[in-house]
């Protein structure tokens, strides 16, 4: 354990990997290279506590600043890798070259931008990092007209935060429903009703044509001619993997750096983790790119296992969550083909769950303010055990009682 591990990307996945390696006995060098000025942090609070409650943008920082020196981790901030040579096992950083024994690409993803008329007007924001949050938060003043482009997690979380601050909020979603990538129409309707009850205007099937304004944003124009007043617009239409370094080095990429269950890429001694990866997911049975808090944690541990010569852990149903107003929504499995929907509880009067079954096995679960059920539901899903729909639907039946005995 005398070789050096170089981690390119100092986000959640990269920072967590560096810490895991030290905790689990890695004695070699560790260099953690990040292109932001801030140390590693978790991103989920940016659209919630940071915007809505004036929390420190670094409320999600992984470790105190002293941690890296104490753990002998070389943390290089505001630095990026210009090139990678997998044969020489070297990356170029500025005018310097860094040699590595193992390289881990944790370069993340960047917010997708719009290419339309007026897209460069002041008043149009993305939300991906602390700098974005610091720029957006002061603009969310009571009475401000805020338009969210995109009805996914980011758009809806920012909508909820802006509404809490007294803004006039409109969400524009191009697809027929909100959360189209992850949620069934029935769940999307619950979310839509919640936002409308809180005063958010929701427009699905809305096609953006242009941003309008003289010197700064004043309105958003749709293809049907509708003009919506807007002093602020936040674009949340997905993310693009930062795979350019890998592509230039000849590493296999397909909407992300292609990795196996052990986080290995097509290049020897080069691993990849986090939002930038396209992984063959055993539970989903497909190659996917998962942008989630959980995936960053799991792939950091998987990479550590590979570096330390340990076997990869089993992969279960993926897990996502979002907080909007007083709703905590947790989704396990993602939007998968199903042949039956089972509901438990009622969104109108308390915790609720929607289960999506295929051959009497849960393939997707959506839990509304029912986080205490997540562990049992995940065990049911990971076991792939058949379940009785009537038992799932009955709030009097403990979900833990349905989990197969080991």
Image (cartoon, helix red, strand yellow):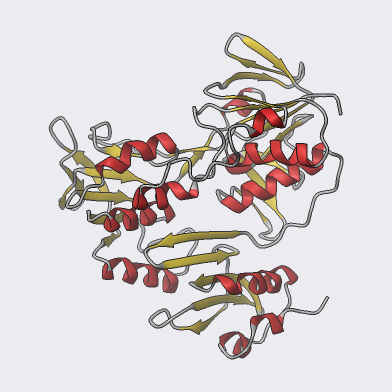
From the viewer's perspective, tell me whether residue 66 is left or right of residue 187. right
Q: Provide residue 173's location: percent of width, then percent of height.
A: 33, 56
From the viewer's perspective, tell me whether residue 2 is left or right of residue 96. right
Q: Provide residue 280's location: percent of width, then percent of height.
A: 69, 50
Q: Quadrant of the N terminus?
A: top right
Q: Quadrant of the C terminus?
A: bottom right
Residue 150's place in the image compared with 277, above or below, is below
Query: Taking the image as drawn, is residue 144 in sight?
Result: yes
Residue at image position (67%, 26%) is: 250
Residue at image position (32%, 55%) is: 159
Quarter location, residue 92: top right
Name the residue furthest top.
Answer: 95
From the viewer's perspective, tell me whether residue 23 is left or right of residue 51. right
Question: Total of numbered circles in the picture?
Answer: 0
Name the residue furthest left.
Answer: 214
Residue 72's place in the image compared with 358, above or below, is above
From the viewer's perspective, tell me whether residue 208 is left or right of residue 307. left
Q: Provide residue 186's location: percent of width, then percent of height.
A: 43, 74
Residue 355's place in the image compared with 73, above or below, is below
Query: Taking the image as drawn, is residue 173 in sight?
Result: no
Of residues 355 and 67, the one nearer the viewer is: 67
Q: Provide residue 115's location: percent of width, then percent of height.
A: 32, 35
Residue at image position (27%, 71%) is: 197
């Amino acid at each position: 354990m005398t070789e050096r591990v170089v981690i390119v990307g100092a986000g959640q996945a990269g920072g967590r990997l560096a810490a895991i390696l030290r905790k689990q006995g890695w004695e070699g060098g560790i260099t953690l290279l990040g292109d932001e000025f801030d140390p590693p942090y978790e991103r989920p609070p940016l659209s919630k506590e940071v915007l809505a409650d004036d929390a420190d943008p670094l409320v999600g920082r992984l470790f105190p600043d002293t941690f890296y020196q104490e753990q002998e981790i070389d943390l290089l901030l505001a630095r990026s890798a210009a090139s990678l040579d997998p044969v020489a096992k070297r990356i170029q950083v500025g005018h310097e070259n860094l040699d590595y024994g193992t390289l881990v690409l944790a370069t993340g993803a960047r917010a997708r931008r719009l290419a339309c008329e007026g897209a460069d007007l002041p008043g149009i924001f993305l939300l991906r990092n602390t700098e974005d949050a610091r720029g957006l938060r002061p603009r969310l003043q009571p009475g401000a007209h805020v338009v969210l482009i995109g009805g996914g997690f980011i758009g809806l979380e920012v909508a909820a935060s802006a509404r809490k601050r007294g803004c006039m909020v409109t969400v524009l979603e191009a697809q027929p429903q909100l959360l189209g990538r992850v949620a069934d129409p029935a769940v999307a309707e619950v979310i839509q009703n919640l936002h409308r009850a809180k005063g958010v205007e929701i427009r699905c099937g809305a096609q953006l044509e242009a941003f309008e304004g003289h010197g700064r944003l004043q309105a958003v124009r749709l293809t049907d001619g509708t003009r919506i007043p807007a002093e602020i617009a936040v674009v949340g239409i997905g993310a693009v993997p930062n795979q350019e370094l890998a592509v230039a080095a000849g590493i296999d990429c397909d909407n992300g750096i292609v990795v196996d269950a052990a986080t290995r890429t097509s290049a020897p001694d080069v691993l990849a983790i986090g939002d930038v990866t396209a992984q063959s997911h055993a539970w989903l049975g497909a190659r996917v790119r998962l942008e989630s808090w959980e995936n960053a944690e799991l792939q950091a541990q998987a990479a550590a296992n590979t570096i330390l010569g340990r076997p990869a852990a089993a992969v279960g149903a993926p897990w996502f969550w979002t907080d909007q107003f007083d709703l905590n929504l947790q989704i396990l499995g993602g939007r998968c083909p199903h042949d039956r929907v089972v509901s438990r509880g009622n969104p109108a009067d308390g915790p609720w769950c929607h289960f999506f079954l295929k051959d009497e096995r849960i393939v997707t679960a959506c839990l509304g303010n029912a986080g205490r059920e997540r562990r049992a539901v995940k065990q049911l899903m990971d076991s792939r055990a058949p379940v009785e729909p009537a038992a799932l639907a009955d709030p009097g039946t403990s979900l833990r009682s349905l989990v197969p005995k080991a």
